[in-house]
Amino acid sequence: MVVSTALVLTAILFFLPVLVLRGEPVYQREEGGELPGGESVLPISPISSAAPAGTRDRGRAVRLLTKEGTVEELTMEEYLWGVVAAEMPASFEEEALKAQACAARTYTAVLQNGTRHPEADICGDSSCCQAYVTRSAAEARWGLNAREYREKIDRAVTQTDGLGVLYEGKPIQALFFSSAAGKTVDAVEVWGNPVAYLKSVDSPEGEEVPNYRTQTVLSPEEVKALVLEAYPGADLTGAPSSWFGEASRNEGGGVISVPLGGVTLTGGQVRSLFSLRSASFTVAWDGSQFTFDVTGYGHGVGMSQYGANTMAKNGSSFRDILTWYYTGAEVGELW
């Protein structure tokens, strides 16, 4: 009898864990429910089976010329975090941030093989190379969103570790800008030289972009002074209404060239001359002043950042984004 009882107890103890595992405790049937007594239950996160991020970027150094004039040596990973944080809003979709990380990594790789800065690989000035911000400065700017944005950019950099944009197996000049007026601009229109992978393509951003449409108003005296300082050969002796000729435009409406005082300027030159946000503009004279109506922001060549974000919202991956904006290019390993 004692033996039989022992066997029964042993069987119960053996099968008890199975019975408990198969049964679902009431307080865990809904994630975020409550334990008896009112204690919160945190949702159970599945264990990730993803392989750890690679370390290709951590194995490469970047010599950065700061705005203060000092040269700092960073890992590529550290440097790219600061570039993405400075160049693209951290509120953007993660696939757009990944595309930005790849473009910035590629641009950096190309500059590291050049001689733009003899004492450094690259500088932190966006008008020369790429913008850069330290983690502490970025997080101070983000305030309550600092942790969320820091982690998003961490993922954008580490999940594209070592990847860049290649054309015929070589890293490209991965240019990027803020927003386009329906289409990007062919490089030949801006710099006069055709580049196979920097062609005009449709870009899907629009009125959701802050300051997508802007106006610049200048007096005839201001226009005259600016034009003659940069182009002394221009003839502005006639009525202001005759100063600007008919503009030649691309498919997206951007200005390719426009006569100004008898001198033909590119849209980019006019943009720079009058500090316009882009070369997609119209100009009107009302008898007392010139009004420039401008759409988009930036030089318009390469990847549009707001366009990339719209594509990401619509389901495009960072690879889709990059191969769309850089014609004929592919995403591959830089190192």
Image: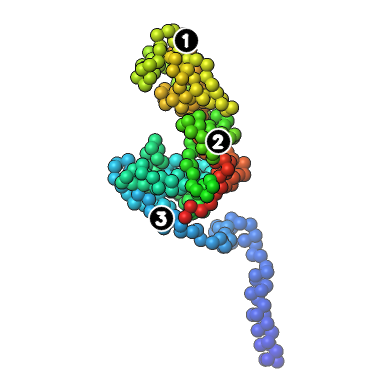
The residue that disc 1 covers is: 241
User: Foreground mark, 3 or 2?
Assistant: 2
Asked whether the beta carbons under mark 1 and mark 2 sit within 8 Å of each other, the answer is no
Q: Position of residue 144 (x, y in %)?
A: 44, 44
- Who's the residue at 35% across and 19% down the image? 229
Q: Few, some or many C-alpha atoms within 10 Å of disc 2 (few <14, some 14-19, many ≥20)?
A: many
Q: Position of residue 232 (x, y in %)?
A: 36, 17
**Mark toward the start of the polypeptide (1 vs 2):** 2
The residue that disc 2 covers is: 199
Q: Which quadrant of the rendered structure holds the N terminus?
A: bottom right
Q: Is residue 6 above or below residue 164?
A: below
Q: Is residue 128 above or below residue 159?
A: above
Under tag 3, what secondary structure?
Answer: loop
Q: Is residue 14 above or below residue 272?
A: below
What amino acid type is highlighted by mark number 2? Lys
Q: Nearer the viewer, residue 305 or 174?
A: 174
Q: Is residue 333 left or right of residue 60?
A: right
**Mark toward the start of the polypeptide (1 vs 3):** 3
Q: Quadrant of residue 249?
A: top right
Under tag 2, what secondary structure?
Answer: loop
**Mark toward the start of the polypeptide (3 vs 2):** 3
* Distance between mark 1 and mark 3 Cα atoms: 57 Å
What amino acid type is highlighted by mark number 1? Ser
* Distance between mark 1 and mark 2 Cα atoms: 34 Å
The residue that disc 3 covers is: 60
